[in-house]
Structure formats: structure tokens, C-alpha cells
Image (spheres, coloured by chain):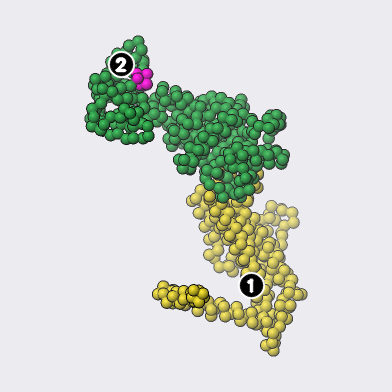
Chain colours: A green, B yellow
């Protein structure tokens, strides 16, 4: 309530533009949360810039939601600090943090109309009635729901309800908006549509958004940066491109790129590349890695980064097991040895035949090496 | 065409009657129908007839006029007042209790509900005498209050309106607690979290979110305890004084002491009508509540 006095001039200055207030930065340092002996989140640290769209990506139990809940104030961290726009909020109650939150289950107040739902946070902040009416109208307009103000939430579809929930979270211009799998309950088509809308609004208004999802495609579409979480830790925090092309762990390579994994040993290093002798016999040229000669390695390469070629030029070859058309691309599975197959995505024009013997090649810069987890 | 149209419903009814399912259904319902006709509908109609007859058997509204004037009217008003007080008290206490129970872990909640309901397996008479022992001038409660030198103790807690309301509230409490508990368990706690995330404090959340969501339950619980209190007999009789005579006692007195059956019948019909009006209101509130529940589920 006290920082309202500071916020009001910016609101007045914003004038004609709807909700022109931009998001603020957020920093999380060494956040930790345990439930009894179970560590839910360990050493989570990140700096999020104002106006950035960041996604916490991970499967269930990875700690992504717990981290979000700690930022929101619903879960108290054991240790660590959370700062929003320079203000330490770590020990504040949720209602004192002034953040926006969009829940998966919408959670609109059933006894209020759409307009009353959106007006609620503004009323709490003592915004004058005329301005409430104006801002509710503008915000509904923003999500294409003008004219729905007098309906009750139950009269809306799921997608519409989530749009209203979004309005309710951004109408008071919180410095950071948190979203917990907001599209999880919607069907695929609606999800794609709302992703585009959320991204558009976020960019237009310069909102800082932290988004939680287990859907890597959604994360790639929406995010400026993605934090991949596993077992309560942030495996890697970077732009989608970084994660895709320079995964720091085999998990990231697998989770985002559905990579193929091959095992082998470092044969020798050249100036530019590391050569790996694969267990299947072939010699593979990969991105430079500081592993010692003879060290066991795991090779990760995404299906889309592989191509078919003549067996003679290949690092490995095998028999085409299946070919599946998915639009302009073809998914090919090649059997390269006992219990070992490689998945490729190639242009439909290069599609091989089932049963054909083909070689597999890749640009060395697209091949990532990891120290093998168990040397046995 | 125009000839066959009016014949259609009759044909349908005949077809329905001819169906084996209908015949079987009627046959199985018959004992209950007879039971209700003999023991419920006939006596009520009899009472109604009685209330409209004068001493010579002619038609009169004299008994109703009698019921709604003088001492009888004041008894009726006392009944309404005590019922309203009981409804209010059991609503407030029931709300607090139900809220506490709804926040407990399921196991403890179940135990708490047993504690609330169990005393009501004991006979009403025994329970009422229990209260008399507790609340008397030399009862446990007053002795304790005197022991700590509470100013004004001992208090008169029996044979007055306080006594009656304590007794009836105790009887009504399980109904309100059970009803409110169900409604409170149905409130999505995440809605409260959502309100908190927007900056609402506890008091605002309670007033603007929680209370409106349980309001239909509060209305039904209040109405239900009001209706049930209207006809209550034992407790007001034993725990109240002459000024707390309720309509059920009056009816009993007219029948057993004054032999004024017609007057008693008229009072019974008036009580029944008030109860029906209350039930009707309860149904209206209930359907409102059902649609609210539907809303919160969607």
C-alpha cells in the first residue's frame, strides 16, 4: 500500500497507453527448500532482467513449481534471498509482494463477474472508480474480451477464463508476473493461440514474466531464457539457442533436443575438433572438448542435426528401420548395431527407403560431448 | 389429424399404465402411499377441519382470530423470537466450530465431528437435565464463576430466555456444523491464495471471497435451525420460565388441560404454515447455493 504513492505518478504519466508500466528485474540467490529429508530446491540462483520472459522447464518433481511458489511467497525458503526491483521480499507475505500470479486452474472468483474479478486487485490498491472502469475495459480489450465484463466466469470457456485470469494479474501492473502452467488445462490448438497472445502482450507491455511448464516446445516458443530444472537444481540457464546448441548436461540435450546418445572413447584431439572412436566402430569428429585421450565419452546429437550420406563418408552406418512423414520433414530410424538405433530428421527430398543401407553424418560443431557418467 | 391429437396424451397414459414397469412400481409404492395417507394426510386434513369448526360444527375462523390475538399471539411471537435467537446463536457458534474443523487434518476432523454429533444420541431429556445441573444457581458453571470472583456471579442461567436459547442452540448445533462443514470443505482454498497473490489481506479475503462463497450455506443452516426450533417442546418447557412458553407447549396445554381441541388445531396449522414457508425459503436458498457450487466447480 505504501508504494502506491510512488506508483501513481507513473500511472498518470503513462497516460493514453494501456498499462505502459514495464516489468522490473528479479534476482534469486542460493534459494533452498527442503521438505523433511527431501530436497525440493537446492542452490537456485538467477538474475532476470526487466522485461525478460523466463521459463522454468522441467518434469514434475524437478523443483520448478516450488521455486515459483517461493518467489510468489506461498512457500517459505529455508535459505537464500529473493529481490524484486532491488527490494528484498524473501520474508514477506504473498499479499505484500505486489506480484502477479496466473494459476493453471484460472481461479477466478465464481461469485464475481469478469469485470469485478479484474477490478478486485485495483480496488485493493485504492484506485479511483473511474480509473478502475477504464483500466478493466482496456485490459479486456487487450485480450479480445471486450463486452464480456458482465458475464460470470462459469459462462466462459477455459481459454476465455484464462484470458481473464491473465487480465486480473496484469491490470495492476505488477513488477513481475508469475505463471504456473497457465495453459496446462487447455487443448493443443487453444494453447498455441494463447502462447502467441501471451508473448505478444508481454513484449508490448514490457512485462517481466516467469513461466513454469513441462512442455519444452512451449518453453522454446515463449522464452527469452529457459532454466532447465532437474532434481531441485538448475541444470542450465540460457537462451533457447544456447540450450539447444550448447547443452551443458546430457539431460538438457535429451530434454530439449530429444538427442541421440552414443558412447565411445576420445581417440585424439586436433586443433579444432575432438575425435571419438565410437563403440560401434566408426570415427566421429565432434566439437572440441577438454577430455583426456582414452576417456569414455557420451555423444549427444539432435535428430535434426543429422543427415544421411553414402556409407563410406559416414561416422556410422546401418539399415533404415522406419521412415515416417511429418510434413516437410521425414523421421528416419536407422539401426546401427545390436540394440542401437539412431533417430534422424531429414528433408523429405533426401528420404531413404526402408531397408536401405545408409551412412549418417553431421557437422562436427553440432555434436556435443559429455564425460560418460559411468566409466564402466 | 386434429382428432387424433387430443387422444394422444390419454393413449400415452393408458400405454404407461399398461406397461409392466408402471404396474410393478405402483404395487411396490402402495404400502408407503397407504401409510402416508392414513397416518399423515388424514390427520392433517382432520386438524385443518377441526380448526375451522365451531362448537356446533359450523364453519368459523374464530380459532384463527383467537390464535393471532392476545396471549396466544404473544406466545407465537415468543416462539418466533426464540427460534430466531437460536438460529443466530447456532449459526455463529456453528460457523466458528465448522471453520475450525474444516481446517483440521481429515482424521482429526472426523473425530471432532463425532464429538459434535455423539451427544445427540443421548435422549433429549437426559441432555436437558444435564444442562440444568450445569447451569443452576448452585450448578457447576456458577460455582466456578463465583470461585474466581467474577462480578455479578451467580448469573440466572435457567428458567429464562438465556436458558432456553442455550438449550435449543445446543440441540441445533450439529445441524449447522454439519451443513456449514460441508460447504466450507467445498471452498477452493486456492481461490484465497489467488486473492492473496493480488495483495488482499486476511480480513479482505474473508469478507470479499470466503464469506460470499459460504453465504448460501449460512442461509440454509440459519433457516434450518430456525425451522427446527419452531416446534421444539422439551427444552423450552424444562429450561425456560413462564415467559418462554413456546407454541408447542401452548398446544399441549390446550389439549391436555383446557380441552380446546379446535384452538389447538388452529395453532398447529399456523405453526405448520410458518414451517412450510421456511422450508420453501430453504429450497430457494438451496437452489441458489447449488448454482453457486456449480460456479465454483467450473
Residue A7, percent across and down?
68, 31
Give the extent of the magenta segment.
A363-369
A316 or B30: nearer the eye?
A: A316
Secondary structure beneath dot 1 equals helix
Task: Determine whether label 1 and label 2 are within 8 Å by CB.
Answer: no
Secondary structure beneath dot 2 equals strand
Q: Height in image: A356 above or below A132?
A: above
> Disc 1 to disc 2, how far (Cα)?
96 Å
Residue B214, percent across and down?
60, 53
| Both labels 1 and 2 in a single chain | no
User: Which residue has dot 2 on it?
Assistant: A275
Quarter residue B120 falls in: bottom right
Residue at mark 1: chain: B
Mark 1: few/some/many CA within 10 Å (<14, 14-19, 20+): some
Residue A26, percent across and down?
57, 27
Q: Quick check: is A367 in the magenta stretch?
A: yes
A355 or A47: nearer the eye?
A: A355
Residue B189, percent across and down?
55, 46
Closer to viewer: mark 1 or mark 2: 2
Amino acid at each position: 500500500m505504501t508504494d502506491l504513492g510512488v506508483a501513481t505518478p507513473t500511472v498518470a504519466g503513462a497516460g493514453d497507453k494501456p498499462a505502459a508500466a514495464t516489468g522490473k528485474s528479479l534476482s534469486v540467490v542460493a534459494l533452498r527448500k527442503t521438505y523433511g529429508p527431501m530436497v525440493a530446491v537446492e542452490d537456485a540462483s538467477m538474475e532476470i532482467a526487466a522485461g525478460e520472459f523466463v521459463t522454468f522447464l522441467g518434469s514434475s518433481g524437478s523443483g520448478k513449481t516450488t521455486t515459483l511458489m517461493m518467489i510468489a511467497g506461498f512457500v517459505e525458503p529455508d535459505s537464500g534471498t529473493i529481490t524484486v526491483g532491488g527490494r528484498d521480499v524473501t520474508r514477506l507475505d504473498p499479499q505484500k509482494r505486489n506480484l502477479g500470479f496466473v494459476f493453471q486452474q484460472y481461479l477466478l472468483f465464481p461469485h464475481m463477474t469478469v469485470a469485478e474479478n479484474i477490478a478486485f486487485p485495483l480496488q485493493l490498491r485504492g484506485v479511483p472508480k473511474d480509473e478502475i472502469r477504464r483500466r478493466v475495459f482496456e485490459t479486456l480489450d487487450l485480450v479480445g474480451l471486450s463486452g464480456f465484463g458482465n458475464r460470470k466466469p462459469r459462462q466462459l470457456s477455459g481459454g476465455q477464463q484464462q484470458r481473464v485470469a491473465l487480465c486480473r494479474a496484469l491490470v495492476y501492473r505488477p513488477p513481475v508476473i508469475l505463471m504456473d502452467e497457465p495453459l496446462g488445462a487447455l487443448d493443443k490448438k487453444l494453447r498455441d493461440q494463447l502462447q502467441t497472445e501471451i508473448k505478444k502482450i508481454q513484449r508490448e507491455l514490457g512485462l517481466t514474466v516467469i513461466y513454469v511448464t513441462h512442455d519444452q516446445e512451449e518453453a522454446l516458443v515463449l522464452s527469452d531464457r529457459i532454466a532447465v530444472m532437474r532434481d531441485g537444481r538448475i541444470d542450465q540457464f540460457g537462451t533457447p539457442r544456447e540450450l539447444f546448441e550448447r547443452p551443458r548436461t546430457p539431460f538438457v540435450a535429451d530434454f530439449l533436443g530429444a538427442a541421440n546418445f552414443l558412447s565411445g572413447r576420445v581417440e585424439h584431439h586436433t586443433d579444432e575438433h575432438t575425435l571419438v572412436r565410437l563403440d560401434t566402430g566408426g570415427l566421429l569428429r565432434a566439437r572440441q572438448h577438454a577430455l583426456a585421450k582414452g576417456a569414455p565419452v557420451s555423444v549427444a546429437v539432435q535428430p535434426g542435426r543429422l543427415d544421411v550420406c553414402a556409407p563410406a563418408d559416414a561416422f556410422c552406418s546401418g539399415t533404415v528401420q522406419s521412415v515416417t512423414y511429418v510434413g516437410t520433414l521425414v523421421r528416419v530410424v536407422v539401426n546401427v548395431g545390436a540394440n542401437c538405433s539412431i533417430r534422424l530428421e531429414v528433408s523429405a527430398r533426401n528420404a531413404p527407403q526402408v531397408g536401405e543401407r545408409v551412412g549418417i553424418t553431421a557437422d562436427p560443431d553440432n555434436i556435443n560431448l559429455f564425460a560418460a557418467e559411468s566409466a564402466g | 389429424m386434429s382428432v387424433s391429437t387430443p387422444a394422444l396424451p390419454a393413449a400415452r397414459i393408458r400405454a404407461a399404465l399398461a406397461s409392466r414397469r408402471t404396474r410393478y412400481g405402483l404395487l411396490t409404492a402402495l404400502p408407503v402411499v397407504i401409510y402416508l395417507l392414513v397416518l399423515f394426510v388424514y390427520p392433517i386434513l382432520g386438524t385443518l377441519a377441526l380448526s375451522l369448526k365451531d362448537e356446533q360444527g359450523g364453519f368459523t375462523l374464530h380459532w384463527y382470530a383467537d390464535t393471532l390475538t392476545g396471549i396466544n399471539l404473544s406466545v407465537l411471537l415468543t416462539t418466533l423470537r426464540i427460534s430466531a435467537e437460536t438460529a443466530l446463536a447456532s449459526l455463529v457458534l456453528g460457523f466458528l466450530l465448522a471453520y475450525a474443523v474444516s481446517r483440521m487434518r481429515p482424521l482429526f476432523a472426523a473425530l471432532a465431528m463425532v464429538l459434535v454429533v455423539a451427544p445427540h444420541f443421548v435422549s433429549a431429556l437426559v441432555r436437558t437435565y444435564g444442562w440444568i445441573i450445569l447451569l443452576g444457581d448452585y450448578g457447576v458453571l456458577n460455582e466456578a464463576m463465583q470461585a474466581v470472583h467474577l462480578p455479578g456471579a451467580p448469573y440466572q442461567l435457567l428458567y429464562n430466555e438465556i436458558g432456553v436459547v442455550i438449550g435449543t442452540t445446543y440441540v441445533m448445533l450439529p445441524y449447522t456444523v454439519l451443513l456449514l462443514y460441508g460447504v466450507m470443505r467445498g471452498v477452493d482454498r486456492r481461490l484465497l491464495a489467488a486473492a492473496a497473490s493480488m495483495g488482499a489481506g486476511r480480513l479482505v479475503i474473508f469478507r470479499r471471497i470466503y464469506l460470499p462463497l459460504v453465504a448460501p450455506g449460512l442461509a440454509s443452516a440459519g433457516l434450518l435451525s430456525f425451522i427446527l426450533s419452531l416446534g421444539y417442546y422439551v427444552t423450552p418447557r424444562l429450561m425456560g420460565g413462564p415467559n418462554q412458553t413456546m407454541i408447542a407447549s401452548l398446544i399441549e396445554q390446550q389439549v391436555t388441560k383446557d380441552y380446546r381441541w379446535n384452538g389447538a388445531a388452529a395453532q398447529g396449522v399456523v405453526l405448520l404454515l410458518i414451517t412450510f414457508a421456511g422450508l420453501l425459503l430453504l429450497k430457494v436458498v438451496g437452489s441458489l447455493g447449488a448454482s453457486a457450487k456449480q460456479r465454483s466447480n467450473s
